[in-house]
Amino acid sequence: MSDRGVLTVRLVRSFEHRNFKPVVYKDVSLDQTVEEFVTFIKRDVSERAGLPPPFKKFDYDTLKIIHQPHGAKTNELVMSLEDDEQLILRNHCRLRTCGVANETELAFFRMEDYKRFKADPHTEW
């Protein structure tokens, strides 16, 4: 089992407007903590060329597994609203221990926005 992997992180700006951008990270240590990976993503996103400023300046705070390799994908366009207990990553946990493996897709979003959307899941176009 490799201790490194390729992870796709979906930067979610708005659940209601289905506004997100995927960013791919290669050679990610799966033995780092969620907190360390969050710090890395925030720094990278703020400096990444080609990302629109609203994505660079957004206050992301939570990671959730969207899809694991060889697993079923959700029908939701942004991410599933189910199984938060198993799929939302806890800061003190190592990525691998939280179920993150090579080719896992994650959503990175603001928890406050997610809770509001989950309570009233309507979308706007």
Image (spheres, rainbow, N blue to C red):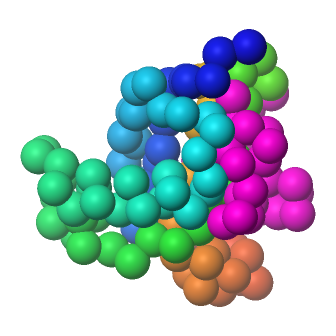
The structure residue drawn at horizontal position 11% and vertical position 46%, both measured from the top left corner, is: 49
Position of residue 68 in the picture relative to residue 78 (left or right): right
Residue 79 appears at what percent x and percent y?
65, 52
- Whether residue 46 appears in magenta in the rendering, the answer is no
**In this view of the protein, can residue 124 be seen by the observer?**
no
Residue 25 appears at what percent x and percent y?
40, 33
Q: Relative to 29, say whether 41 is above or below.
A: below
Q: Relative to 48, say whether 125 is above or below.
A: below
Q: Relative to 4, say whether 61 is above or below.
A: below
Residue 72 appears at what percent x and percent y?
80, 27
Asked which quadrant contains residue 27, the reply is top left
Q: Nearer the viewer, residue 94 or 122?
A: 94
The structure residue drawn at horizontal position 36% and vertical position 48%, both measured from the top left corner, is: 21
Asked which quadrant contains residue 57, the reply is bottom left
Mark count: 0
Q: Magenta region's main secondary structure?
A: loop
Give the residues in magenta.
72-101
The structure residue drawn at horizontal position 29% and vertical position 60%, both measured from the top left corner, is: 43
